[in-house]
Image (tube, rainbow, N blue to C red):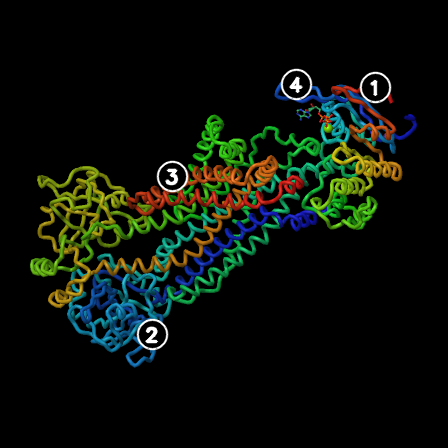
């Protein structure tokens, strides 16, 4: 982690608690991390350790109770929800464990979505190129229900980078896929990371996938613990 | 992002989904019904108003209970105005063993001054004519049919044979719409000679004028101070006012039906929007994560719905315009003149109402989506956090009450309707909550599949409540339209006790009484009741001359300027009850008077007030000694004012009789009429038939609008059942995966829906019955008891409808492979 490199994402002392049926529950407790631009980070840990919560906070989907997160040079806690939305629109892409494609839209329309949100250029051409890049040029007009899980995840990846985001957040992107398909999908993610310089933040249970990342953050009960690797 | 384009695209993609189509269909129906009713109303009203001069048969006139002195005609002549003298009265016409009540118009040769009298003569030729020559008449088709006559035949009026010179095809002063009996036009001389226009007759005498407006104005100035004994000016403006109020009564039922369909549409829209919003939750979470701002989420959702709603409203308006054109084509001959072309204003108003319904009912569920946290893309459970109260939830009831208040013609209708709908909503929520709590306790002891079905209702608490409320409201509306409305009308026109008087006799002179009574009894008359009738003028209340401007009730002017028919009796008339004070005991030292409730309210009277009347040459001042309430639906002769018999002794009067005669004997009245030609006989059977005929014609026009309301009600049903379809899909698939048999699935679904239908149906029945009772009491002024059978049938139909619809809706799911359903999730 060279200090001179541009920092894509940093978190300092991030904490988050929720009040549940059995009182207050500390989900995250003083987590800090730094990810230089163009590099990759894996967040690992046992189920319930707070990985998804951290990812959501890092991507600006929610506010931490305390601590500071700086995304693409912007301190998230100084932005209101609208400004954070604008930041996500322009700088961030998402890949989810259960794909989250809109069932009413075709593959192509799903991929066009981020561009339509931003009103940028020729959405259709860009979407077709993105789908071609993930090897789905032949499936433009298929609906999610007509695609396999691996294909759906590839559409989701095309959607995540179609607008050229600086950062890509992925929550267990291979969690719902078999080993081989999972491999194809993670190859795709790292290709993007490499070829486009996209900073990759992913949550995973898959140690093989975690090992391919430059950095690994391990959580245990909401705290960051030092990782052996 | 171009939000309009985005909304348009998502609309195009999502129209495949049922809820948007439901929403659009509901709007189309509501706007169509409102457009049709309002446009039709406006065109009919305009047609009637435009022909007002033709309807009164002149540009100006004077009318009264007495024939006008010759100076009136002389003055018209001096001013260069054309004039025509006529008199109108109801009378029974006889021919070849048949009889029929007719509205007789006796007119001089100048008739008609305005408009056209067109007849078909015996040789089949059509001609525009003036009033018939002496000894001949023109009769309208209905009269000829009911008497079995054709032009050229002879009929008998007041003992005189008259030849039918032609069948009336088109006539001024009143189309068929407002006449209670078929019309007969006779020569004025014939009516005068037969004694039909004598003192105490029911005739209304008219002198009509036509000509130069300034001359008309001068005549009006001259005539005004000359009018006495209740004679009045007949002006075009006043005729328009009367027509308008007559028309408004007929229009209110139509408006009610259209209003209900708009409300039902509102419920369907709310349900569809609610389901749409639920389905969109995940999508909104995703869009928010991808960076779409809160306001734009709301904007794009609202735009999608608006882009759908606007064309739907336009389509509805088009449909409504077509519908009203159809009705006019079908029933246009009821109108006195051709209807003017439709104006777009009612259609635009209907579109505005449609958009208000859309915004009012669809916005609240959509607006909640603003608050979907983007974090939900990772954790679906997040959205289930407790909801805070949103001011927007007040929007649907506000819009609903706004609609009720602005669209219903009377506040009594509006409050009965709003009250029952509010009550049904509250009752459903309360009863639903109680039942759900009960189900949670006892549900465990029920057999397997049924338990699961009922547990479903309890588990989806808010969905079940929404469903039950929507169903209950739509069943209430349907019951109101299908059972209560027709029931009220039927109760109003039928259900009279046996031997209720069906014949009236007017203008009976005291010296003829014994002879006529005997003749009637010989014919088989029952319940013969003869009462004196004197024509009086109210000159003072508590010693001061009453002034029209002191009374808010417009009817007061008629009694103050016009004449009052009063009677006397030493016993309290049947179907009257004393509400305050006491009936005459014959011991009072000063004249006493008993006043009916309507007069008390209208003229602000109380016990102990004094009323002064002039009756012919006599003047009487009497003290109010009792206040009565008369049953005006009893078909007996009722009087607002009854004098004590001692004070009435020697007053100039005629007699009025009511009696029951078997319908088949009414032709025998001809002999009585021949013997006593001055009698005016009124056959109420014929009046009732005529009323029924008009009601039937109007209701066939209403049927189309009713149809819209019914479809709107069914739409609500579909929308309500769709609310839980998504959940049900998943559950059914799960149960199938776990190996449930089809029979068990069926039992689950049927149990759940049958209970839902039963709750909704029962509450709706109670709500509709309550609305009916209050409408009957406040609007129709009748005692109507909710009929048990139709209501029970309504509840059963509700159960059956919901169960079958639920089963049909779920059947598809049960058949699909569970794998497919799971894969979609
Ligand atoms: N909104 C919330 N309300 C209550 N508890 C929450 C909420 N969000 C998260 N939690 C709890 O916080 C803990 C961490 O959740 P999180 O989803 O971040 O875990 P995770 O590490 O992603 O687990 P997994 O590997 O199973 O996905 C869990 O115990 C979860 O139940
Ligand atoms: Mg997780």
In the rendered structure, find residue B118 and report the number of the disc placed on it.
2
Please state the chain letter of the residue tagged with numbered disc 1 in the rendered image: A
- Residue at which label 4 appears: A24
Indicate whether B36 appears above or below B104: above
Mark 2 → mark 1, Cα distance in angstroms? 108 Å
Looking at the rendering, the quadrant in which ligand 2 lies is top right
State the SS at label 2.
Answer: strand
In the rendered structure, which disc, 4 or 1, sits on the residue that comes first in sequence? Answer: 4
Cα distance between the residues tagged 3 and 1: 70 Å
Rendered-image quadrant of the C terminus of chain B: top right
Find out if the beta carbon at label 1 lies less than 8 Å from the nearest ligand 1 atom: no
Q: Which residue is mark 1?
A: A226
What is the CA distance from the residue labelled 4 to the residue labelled 1?
26 Å
Q: Which residue is mark 3?
A: B766
Residues under numbered marks 2 and 1 in contact, where contact means CB atoms less than 8 Å apart? no
Q: Nearer the viewer, residue B680 or B481?
A: B481
The answer to whether residue A29 is left or right of residue B220 is right
Q: In this orientation, does residue B75 appear? A: yes
Residue A83 place in picture, x, y as percent = 74, 34
Chain ID of residue with mark 4: A
The answer as to whether callout 3 falls within 8 Å of ligand 1 is no
């Amino acid at each position: 982690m060279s200090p001179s490199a541009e920092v894509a994402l940093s978190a300092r002392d991030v904490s988050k608690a929720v009040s549940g049926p059995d009182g207050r529950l500390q989900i995250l407790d003083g987590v800090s991390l730094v990810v230089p631009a163009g590099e990759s980070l894996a967040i690992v840990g046992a189920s319930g350790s707070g990985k998804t919560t951290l990812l959501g906070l890092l991507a600006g989907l929610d506010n931490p109770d305390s601590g500071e997160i700086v995304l693409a040079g912007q301190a998230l806690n100084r932005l209101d929800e609208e400004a954070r939305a604008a930041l996500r629109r322009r700088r961030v892409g998402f890949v989810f464990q259960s794909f989250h494609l809109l069932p009413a839209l075709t593959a192509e329309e799903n991929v066009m979505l981020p561009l339509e949100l931003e009103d940028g250029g020729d959405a259709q051409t860009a979407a077709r190129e993105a789908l071609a890049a993930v090897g789905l040029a032949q499936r433009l007009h298929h609906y999610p229900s007509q695609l396999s899980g691996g294909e759906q995840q590839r559409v989701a990846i095309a959607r995540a980078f179609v607008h050229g985001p600086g950062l890509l957040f992925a929550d267990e992107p291979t969690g719902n896929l078999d080993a081989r398909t999972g491999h194809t999908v993670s190859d795709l993610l790292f290709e993007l990371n490499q070829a486009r310089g996209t900073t990759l933040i992913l949550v995973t249970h898959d140690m093989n996938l975690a090992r391919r990342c430059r950095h690994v953050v391990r959580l245990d009960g909401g705290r960051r613990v030092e990782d052996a690797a | 992002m171009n939000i309009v384009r985005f909304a348009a695209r998502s609309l195009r993609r999502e129209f495949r989904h049922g809820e948007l189509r439901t929403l659009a269909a509901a709007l189309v129906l509501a706007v169509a019904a409102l457009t049709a009713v309002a446009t039709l109303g406006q065109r009919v009203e305009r047609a009637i108003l435009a022909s007002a001069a033709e309807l009164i048969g002149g540009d100006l006139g004077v009318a009264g209970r007495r024939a006008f002195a010759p100076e009136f005609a002389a003055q018209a002549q001096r001013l260069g105005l054309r004039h025509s003298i006529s008199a109108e009265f109801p009378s029974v016409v006889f021919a070849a063993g048949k009889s029929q009540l007719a509205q007789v118009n006796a007119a001089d040769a100048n008739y008609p001054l305005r408009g056209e009298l067109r007849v078909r003569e015996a040789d089949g030729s059509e001609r525009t004519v003036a009033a018939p020559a002496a000894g001949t008449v023109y009769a309208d088709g209905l009269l000829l049919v009911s008497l079995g006559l054709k032009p050229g035949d002879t009929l008998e009026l007041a003992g005189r044979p008259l030849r039918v010179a032609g069948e009336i095809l088109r006539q001024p002063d009143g189309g068929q719409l407002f006449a209670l009996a078929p019309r007969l036009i006779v020569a004025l001389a014939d009516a005068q000679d037969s004694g039909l226009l004598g003192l105490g007759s029911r005739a209304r005498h008219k002198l009509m004028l036509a000509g130069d407006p300034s001359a008309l104005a001068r005549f009006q100035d001259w005539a005004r101070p000359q009018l006495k004994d209740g004679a009045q000016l007949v002006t075009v403006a006043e005729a328009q006012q009367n027509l308008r109020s007559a028309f408004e009564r007929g229009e209110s039922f139509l408006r009610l039906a259209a209003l209900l369909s708009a409300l039902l549409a509102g419920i369907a829209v709310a349900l569809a929007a609610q389901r749409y919003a639920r389905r969109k939750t995940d999508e909104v979470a995703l869009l928010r994560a991808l960076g779409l701002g809160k306001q734009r989420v709301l904007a794009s959702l609202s735009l999608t719905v608006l882009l759908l709603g606007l064309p739907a409203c336009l389509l509805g308006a088009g449909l409504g315009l077509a519908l009203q054109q159809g009705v006019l084509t079908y029933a246009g001959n009821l109108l006195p003149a051709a209807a003017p072309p439709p104006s777009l204003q009612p259609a635009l108003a209907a579109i505005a109402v449609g958009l208000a319904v859309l915004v009012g009912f669809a916005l609240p569920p959509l607006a909640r989506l603003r608050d979907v946290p983007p974090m939900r893309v990772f954790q679906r459970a997040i959205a289930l956090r407790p909801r805070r109260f949103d001011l927007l939830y007040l929007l649907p009831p506000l819009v609903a009450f706004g609609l009720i208040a602005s669209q219903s013609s009377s506040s009594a209708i509006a409050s009965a309707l709003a009250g029952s709908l509010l009550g049904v909503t509250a009752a459903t929520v309360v009863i639903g909550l109680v039942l759900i709590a009960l189900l949670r306790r006892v549900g465990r002891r029920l057999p397997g599949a049924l338990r699961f079905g009922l547990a479903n209702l309890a588990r989806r608490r808010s969905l079940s409540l929404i469903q039950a409320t929507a169903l209950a409201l739509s069943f209430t509306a349907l019951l109101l339209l299908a059972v209560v409305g027709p029931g009220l009308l039927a109760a109003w026109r039928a259900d009279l006790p046996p031997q209720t008087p069906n014949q009236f006799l007017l203008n009976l002179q005291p010296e003829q009484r014994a002879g006529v009574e005997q003749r009637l009894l010989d014919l088989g008359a029952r319940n013969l009741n003869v009462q004196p009738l004197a024509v009086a003028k109210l000159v003072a209340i508590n010693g001061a001359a009453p002034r029209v401007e002191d009374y808010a009730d417009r009817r007061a002017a008629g009694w103050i300027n016009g004449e009052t028919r009063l009677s006397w009796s030493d016993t309290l008339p049947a179907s009257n009850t004393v509400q305050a004070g006491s009936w005459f005991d014959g011991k009072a030292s000063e004249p006493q008077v008993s006043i009916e409730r309507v007069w008390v309210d209208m003229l602000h009277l109380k016990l102990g007030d004094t009323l002064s009347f002039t009756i012919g040459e006599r003047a009487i001042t009497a003290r109010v000694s009792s206040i009565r309430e008369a049953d005006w639906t009893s078909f007996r002769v009722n009087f607002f004012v009854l004098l004590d018999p001692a004070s009435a002794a020697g007053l100039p009067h005629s007699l009025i009789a009511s009696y029951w005669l078997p319908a088949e004997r009414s032709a025998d009245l001809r002999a009585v009429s021949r013997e006593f030609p001055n009698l005016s006989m009124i056959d109420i059977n014929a009046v009732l038939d005529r009323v029924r005929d008009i009601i039937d014609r109007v209701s066939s026009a209403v049927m189309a609008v009713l149809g819209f309301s019914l479809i709107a009600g069914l739409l609500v049903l579909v929308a309500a059942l769709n609310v839980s379809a998504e959940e049900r899909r998943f559950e059914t698939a799960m149960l199938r995966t776990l190996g449930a048999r089809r029979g068990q699935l069926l039992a689950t679904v049927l149990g759940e829906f049958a209970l839902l239908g039963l709750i909704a149906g029962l509450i709706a029945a109670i709500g509709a019955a309550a609305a009916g009772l209050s409408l009957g009491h406040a609007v129709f002024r009748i005692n109507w008891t909710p009929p048990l059978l139709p209501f029970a049938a309504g509840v059963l139909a509700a159960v059956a409808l919901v169960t079958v619809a639920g089963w049909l809706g779920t059947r598809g799911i049960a058949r699909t492979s569970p794998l497919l359903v799971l894969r979609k999730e």
